[in-house]
Amino acid sequence: MNLGNWLRRTAQLSPNRPALFLGEEEIADYRCFDAGAAHVAGWLRSQGISPGDRVGIFMKNCPDYLIAFYGIWYAGAVAVPINAKLHGREAAFILENSGTGLCFTSPGLAEALEEAGAPGLRVDISGADFAAALDHDPVADPAPRDPDDLAWLFYTSGTTGRPKGVQITHRMLMAVSLCYQTDVDQATAADAILYAAPMSHGAGLYNMVHVLLGARHVCPASGGFDPAEIFALARQHRNIQMFAAPTMVHRMTAAAKAAGESGEGLRTIVYGGGPMYLADITEAVEHFGPIFVQIYGQGECPMGITALPRDLVADRDHPRWRERLLSVGRAQSPVQVRIGDANGNPVPPGAHGEIMVKGDIVMPGYWNNPEANAKTLVNGWLMTGDMGFMDADGFVTMQDRSKDMIITGGTNVYPREVEEVLLTHPAVSEASVVGRPHPDWGEEVVAFVVGAAPEAELDALCNDNIARFKRPKAYIFALELPKNNYGKVLKTELRKMLEEDT
């Protein structure tokens, strides 16, 4: 089933219900939201977009994001949301790899794609083409789609440095949405979802259940994350639900304490996407109250591996509450989760191994990448690459990340991407990138470099090729990098060196 039908049904039942907001301003009710999507779909069809074709969204958070998103689905096409923080060249690679011939952009981002030589038509939502799309003859109904048809192509970086396209089906998104109600939170039509994190990722994945319920969708006028703005919008809109990275929770708590904000109007903050420190979540609950829910997922199993509901996040009476709060919760209802040994065989409770998951939220595979599929999908199980253990009560605790991923501000950075850029400098013979703990961002990117390249040139090289948040915040020059007997760089030793310097 095409999930676009959820918007159509809500518009039929509650056409006058407020739907889309920019800050405090209402932009559209559900009748207008539905009509906008239908008009965009009609225009996409006129541009030669057929069911199954990919259409990009390279936009900052705004109400038109959702109109374009559902317009793509109404046309039967596949949405390819791209993080607006990515460099134009990175976005261009995604468009080319996915075979995307048309991409919606927000002001300023079309130029980045053009400079990068991105393929296809670029449609700026502030321009004449998008205005024409909103005025085009609408489609009568969302195009028929089967549950296992592709709905969303989600690009997540891999250890090779090349992004991989995770195929997300309508069935997967239905499961994500329905288990939000059973495992995460009980959303209602009286709620508002606030998009302070990128809609191309976790925040956007929760839009469908709120569309189904007829809730309000609020985009901050700033287009991003600003604690003071969030507190003001929460007081105005009330019953706010939002997704936040752990570093965002940390910053919200600090800002609220400094400004004397109580968090009035915040109903639920779902956090995930990185490690949450015990001290941070304990302090956040003490200040804001029992409004926090933890989820654990990956692009390959979006938002849907485990959850720790608000009562357990806030519980301080259980004898093992600290251990449970350090966990990522228990398996969500549509999936099975187990801990496996090196061969994928289940291990006893408490034993360390790789977190494995199977079920209706797990991807069918990567886009045109059979080699990666063979490594990641084994006997029906998704091999997450995350290491941890499960206790006798089913609580899963992550202990480390096997792929050396760095999470800064809730956004993934894979060291190989940065290393490959640094190694293009003629004066760099070796480079190795690791994460260093940071009080605000969780981790920051640090590069160990063998060579005599000036830091300013390395910065310029990174700025020309990758997103700014991936650029190293520090360079440490060395005569050589520590290696094992096989010549592999020992990143554990590099992290120890950073710890010794602090």
Image (cartoon, rainbow, N blue to C red):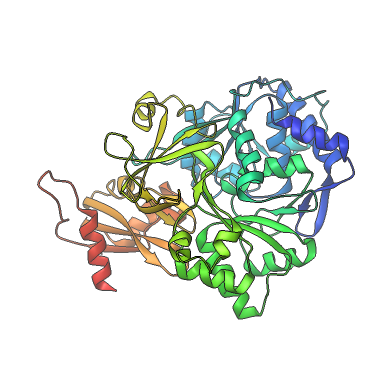
Is there any visible trace of residue 397 in the rendered image? yes
Question: Among all residues in the image, which is located at the extreme left?
Answer: 485
In this rendering, the answer to whether 198 lies above or below 103 is below
Q: Quadrant of the C terminus?
A: bottom left
In this rendering, the answer to whether 272 lies above or below 323 is above
In this rendering, the answer to whether 437 lies above or below 45 is below
Q: Residue at x 62, y 74 (%)?
A: 256
Q: Residue at x 68, y 64 (%)?
A: 230
| Residue 119 located left or right of residue 357 | right
Q: Residue at x 83, y 46 (%)?
A: 28
Where residue 119 sits in the image (x, y, percent)? 53, 30
Q: Residue at x 82, y 49 (%)?
A: 27
Residue 182 location, quadrant: top right
| Residue 273 located left or right of residue 122 | left
Where residue 363 sits in the image (x, y, percent)? 49, 31
Question: Among all residues in the image, which is located at the extreme right?
Answer: 16
Is there any visible trace of residue 452 in the rendered image? no
Where residue 354 sits in the image (x, y, percent)? 34, 43
Query: Which of the two residues, 39 or 289, is positioned nearer the viewer here?
Result: 289
| Residue 304 located left or right of residue 404 | right
Where residue 278 sits in the image (x, y, percent)? 45, 67
Query: Which of the two residues, 321 or 464, is positioned nearer the viewer here?
Result: 321
Q: Quadrant of the N terminus?
A: top right
